[in-house]
């Protein structure tokens, strides 16, 4: 789903309502659809489509919030089965962010992002169960970490893992990796799954962790896109990891900085893999 304009039909409230409303239909189709047999490929596509629907109502003021809402939804979808799975985060970050820091204040994302979302939720309760759980998780973790902190994807994922699940969080910056280890040791005990922290290149470590012993996995790939070769590295990596483990669920976040670069990346991926794939891009401003 690619929206180049947010006017008319694609105005926020309209498309948000439609996106949330079709989630039950997608879930029904994943179980009872007759056009395609409801095998793992159909279910993976349906979960990816639900992930895309969940991105639409929130906006893009803070990408971490978008990711974590979708992440919780995907984790809960995998937890519908009793068998455990591996959650693998290739660019985990520090796990917890101080909104009073200079970096946080400079960008202004928290004021326009999570602060606005929490304020809006107080005025009008959100209808989406995924957003309700996300906000509840943020509030619960903030009660432990402080009101002016923001939990990242590793901490949120760790807080909902079951005893049969496990997580592997990889961070390339040594200082961030050490901070992540301290954060999860102090605040990650709400979840029951085992969590392993690794310092290193997420791309290099990813293939080494696959296939998981559980034969089920959710892989979150959320690079900072600070290097010019990020798109080529992703395109080169995907065929290899899918060759090693093609039944996993892979969620990749990417920015649309230059449309031509994104289109070329999509075309390269389409030529190199055959697995069901969904590209969901949210455009807030007309081009």
Image (cartoon, helix red, strand yellow):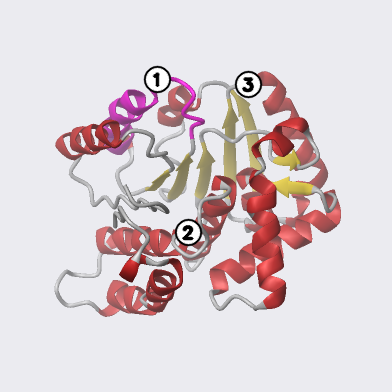
Viewer-proximal residue among 117 and 29: 117
Residue 74 is tagged as 2
Disc 1 to disc 2: CB gap under 8 Å: no
184 horizontally vs 39: left or right: right
Q: Residues within 10 Å of mark 3 (few under 14, many from 20)?
A: some
Badge nearest the viewer, 3 or 1: 1
Q: In 3D space, how far apart are the residues under numbered discs 3 and 2 (Cα atoms)?
A: 27 Å
Where 262 sits versus 53, above or below? above
Tell me where residue 105 sits by quadrant.
top right
Does residue 105 appear to the left or right of 82 in the view shown?
Answer: right
Label 3 or label 1, whichever comes before in sequence order = 3
Q: Contact (CB < 8 A) between labels 3 and 1?
A: no
Element under disc 1 = loop
Q: Position of residue 215 (x, y in %)?
A: 41, 48
For the residue labelled by badge 2, is the local secondary structure a helix, a strand or a loop?
Answer: helix
Task: State which region is magenta.
Answer: 223-243
For residue 42, above or below residue 225: below
Q: Which residue is mark 1?
A: 228
The disc, 1 or 2, on the residue closer to the chain's N-terminal end is 2
Labels 3 and 2 touching (C-beta < 8 A)? no
Please rate how many residues cluster around mark 2, counting C-alpha atoms within 10 Å: few if below 14, some from 14 to 19, many from 20: many
The residue pinned by badge 3 equals: 173
Sequence-wise first label, 3 or 2: 2
Q: Residue at x 55, y 68 (%)?
A: 130
């Amino acid at each position: 789903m690619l929206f180049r304009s947010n006017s008319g039909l694609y105005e926020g409230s309209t498309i948000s309502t439609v996106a949330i409303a079709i989630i039950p239909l997608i879930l029904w189709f994943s179980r009872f659809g007759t056009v395609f047999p409801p095998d793992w490929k159909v279910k993976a596509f349906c979960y990816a489509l639900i992930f895309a629907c969940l991105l639409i109502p929130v906006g893009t003021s803070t990408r971490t919030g978008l990711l974590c809402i979708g992440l919780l939804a995907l984790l809960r979808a995998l937890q519908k089965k009793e068998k455990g799975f591996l959650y693998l985060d290739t660019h985990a970050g520090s796990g917890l962010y101080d909104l009073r820091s200079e970096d946080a204040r400079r960008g202004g994302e928290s004021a326009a992002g999570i602060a606005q979302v929490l304020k809006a939720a107080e005025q009008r309760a959100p209808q989406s169960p995924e957003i309700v759980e996300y906000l509840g998780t943020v509030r619960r973790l903030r009660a432990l970490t402080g009101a002016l902190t923001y939990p990242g994807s590793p901490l949120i994922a760790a807080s909902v893992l079951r005893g049969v699940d496990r997580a592997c969080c990889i961070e390339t910056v040594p200082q961030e990796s050490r901070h992540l280890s301290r954060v999860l040791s102090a605040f990650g005990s709400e979840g029951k799954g085992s969590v392993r922290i690794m310092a290193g290149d997420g791309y290099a470590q990813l293939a080494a962790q696959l296939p998981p012993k559980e034969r089920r996995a959710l892989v979150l790939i959320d690079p900072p896109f600070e290097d010019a070769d990020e798109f080529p590295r992703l395109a080169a990596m995907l065929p290899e990891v899918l060759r090693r483990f093609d039944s996993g669920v892979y969620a990749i976040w990417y920015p649309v900085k230059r449309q031509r670069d994104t289109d070329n990346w999509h075309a390269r991926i389409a030529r190199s893999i055959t697995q069901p794939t969904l590209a969901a891009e949210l455009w807030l401003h007309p081009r």
